[in-house]
Image (tube, rainbow, N blue to C red):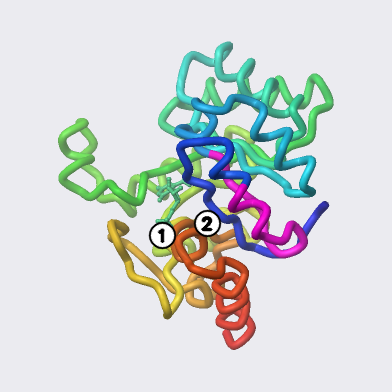
């Protein structure tokens, strides 16, 4: 089932059963689901098949970062499982991203292919420690332009960079932003958070939301509250 909703709910669970329990409480016409490293490492492709069987589109968030041929193969494998979106690390460089794009194009595989810029958990001091003297905002801009020029459909960044990325890369370039906190939710361990409505008006095209929905007593009520915040703008 395809949905027009910008909401992607992060299924951050340690078992297939727990993830499917949550999926069964959500509506595939009102959100997509994100499967990350922990769940996929435990469950393997079974989780993707099970979510597809329930009508959900899946964002496979494995943040591939390796030599070009290896990443191209991994991206091909994701596309052949019918995944809606997959991501790689823009830090893997132009040749890696181009190889992934070329592999999909050559096989006629359609799937959104996006690149992670700077993780929302990283601050300027963390970048300095790995030899990057730019600020997070500067580094996000640099990697977003590289990702666009290397054939990516969009990037993952914090919503705080979305406005600038829209100016630089256009409205159609996907801007998938985690760190979203509706009015009713606590920031928790996220540092650079933004409300759903502010993130959309800044230029985000998709909002990744985890705990505000998955830890709510009634996940669909939490999702409806986010939809109401979006509608109120
Ligand atoms: O790639 C991601 O989805 C991601 C990138 C990033 O920079 N920061 C970030 O929080 N995420 C993911 O977004 C989700 C946020 O979940 P909550 O903080 O519970 O809303 C988690 O699954 C994170 O792994």
Position of the C terminus by quadrant: bottom right
- Do the residues under discs 1 and 2 have CB atoms within 8 angstroms? yes
Along the line of sight, the residue nearer the viewer: 24 or 209 = 24
Residue drawn 32% across the image and 66% down it? 187
Question: On the image, which quarter does residue 16 sit in?
Answer: top right
Name the residue tied to disc 1: 179
What is the secondary structure assignment of the residue under circle 1? Answer: loop
Relative height, residue 88 to residue 162 (above, below): above
Horizontally, residue 79 falls left or right of residue 167, namely right
Mark 2 crowdedness (10 Å alpha carbons): few <14, some 14-19, many ≥20: many
Q: Ligand 1 within 8 A of label 2's CB?
A: yes
Q: Tell me: 84 left or right of 107.
A: left
* Magenta span contains residue 183: no
- The label shown at residue 166 is none
Instruction: Tell me the residue at 50%/44% (across/down).
Output: 145
| x and y percentages locating residue 151 in the rendered image | 64, 35
Q: Residue under label 2, please give it.
A: 208
Q: Secondary structure at mark 2?
A: strand
Q: Is mark 1 within 8 Å of ligand 1?
A: yes
From the top left corner, tell me how far across and down residue 203 is, in percent.
Answer: 55, 67
Could you tell me which residue is drawn at 59 percent across and 70 percent down?
223
Q: Quadrant of residue 43?
A: top right
Instruction: Tell me which segment is drawn in magenta.
Output: 21-35
């Amino acid at each position: 089932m395809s949905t027009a909703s910008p909401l992607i709910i992060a299924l951050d669970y340690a078992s297939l059963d727990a993830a499917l329990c949550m999926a069964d409480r959500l509506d595939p016409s009102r959100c997509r689901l994100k499967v990350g490293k922990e769940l996929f490492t435990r469950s393997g492709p079974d989780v993707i098949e099970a979510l597809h069987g329930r009508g959900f589109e899946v964002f496979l968030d494995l943040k591939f970062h390796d030599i070009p041929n290896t990443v191209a193969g991994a991206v091909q494998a994701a596309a052949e499982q019918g995944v809606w979106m997959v991501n790689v690390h823009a830090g893997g460089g132009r040749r890696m991203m181009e190889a992934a794009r070329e592999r999909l194009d050559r096989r006629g595989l359609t799937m959104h292919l996006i690149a992670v810029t700077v993780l929302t958990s990283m601050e300027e001091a963390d970048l300095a420690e790995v030899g990057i003297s730019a600020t997070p905002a500067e580094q996000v801009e640099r990697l977003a332009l590289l990702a666009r020029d290397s054939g990516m459909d969009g990037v993952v960044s914090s919503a705080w960079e979305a406005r600038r990325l829209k100016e630089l890369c256009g409205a159609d370039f996907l801007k998938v932003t985690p760190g979203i906190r509706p009015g009713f939710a606590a920031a928790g361990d996220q540092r650079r958070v933004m409300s759903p409505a502010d993130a959309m008006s800044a230029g985000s095209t998709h909002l990744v939301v985890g705990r505000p929905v998955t830890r709510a007593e009634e996940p669909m009520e939490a999702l409806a509250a986010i939809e109401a915040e979006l509608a109120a703008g």
